Amino acid sequence: MAQHTLDLFAQSSAPEPDAPAGTSWTAVRDALDTDGVALTDPLLSAEECAEALSWWDEPARFRSTVVMQRHGFGRGTYRYLADPLPGLVQRLRERLYPPLAGIANDWAPLLKERRFPLAHRDLATECAEAGQYKPTPLLLRYGPGDHATLHQDLYGDIVFPLQAAIMLNQPDRDFTGGESVFVEQRPRSQSRVLVLRPQRGHGLVFPVRHRPVLGAHGYRRHAMRHGTGTVHTGTRTVLGIIFHNAR
Ligand SMILES: O=C(O)CCC(=O)C(=O)O
Ligand SMILES: [Fe+2]
């Protein structure tokens, strides 16, 4: 058996999906609260990363392909997976969602936003009723000179506030450069940058739009954007897991 990974999933299969316990999810939550971005334990084994990489050249797996430079999104290519999603992606989406919904629901009053259902299928149903029925998990691939400009992944009125991205290539072996970049816009202050470099199989969890930060007069929203630094050599591929679907 491959190292079907690991602590985060062990916790997310616990009977109380809205109360993720254990070191890993606590660490994710702490990092999100402190820095706005969390680096996770491994979410995929080397074999699973290789499987996901093999999808790239199988056009039937994708519903659309976007050449980023044609849209001013940077340089590189991304491809949205089609329904039915590969089992590995479906499982990741379903198993990451409950603990993240717990965090989102704790953030909701601080951001003055709505709460979310605790099972992904219920979010998917809500999305479909709002016309957001296209799956949003995607593979992004960058070669030398490629990069992604800062953005937010909004696909309609329904926005689940957290998303994940999993690194499928090994930094410094498969590619150089290609840092994951996050910019936090602080109201009436200068912006903060976070730069991370997850190892293969590890993930990042980050806010889609903004995060709550306690100020002198209560909680404020800090807008967050993410992007990718220029890849210098090699190939960098990421699996993006966005929980709301698209129009
Ligand atoms: O790490 C990257 O290349 C950016 C991924 C991204 O934009 C996403 O997962 O939404
Ligand atoms: Fe993105």
Image (cartoon, rainbow, N blue to C red):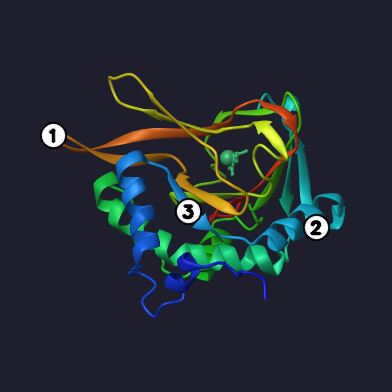
Looking at the image, which residue is at 66% across and 55% down? 134
Image quadrant occupied by the N terminus: bottom right
Query: First in sequence: mark 3 or mark 2?
Result: 3
Residue farthest to the bottom, as pictured: 15
Marks 2/1: CA–CA distance = 49 Å
Q: Amino acid at mark 3?
A: Thr
Label 1 element class: loop
Looking at the image, which residue is at 46% across and 76% down? 13
Instruction: Tell me if mark 2 has few (under 14), some (14-19) or many (20+) residues whose alpha carbon lies within 10 angstroms of its own.
Output: some
Instruction: Tell me if mark 3 has few (under 14), some (14-19) or many (20+) residues whose alpha carbon lies within 10 angstroms of its own.
Output: many
Q: Which mark is residue 217?
A: 1
Label 3 element class: strand
Label 2 element class: helix
Q: Which mark is residue 61?
A: 2
Residue farthest to the front, as pictured: 173
Marks 3/1: CA–CA distance = 32 Å
> Quick check: can you spot residue 114?
no
Q: Amino acid at mark 2?
A: Arg
Q: Is residue 58 above or below residue 124?
A: above
* Residue 72 picture quarter: top right
Query: First in sequence: mark 3 or mark 1?
Result: 3
> Which residue position holds label 3?
40
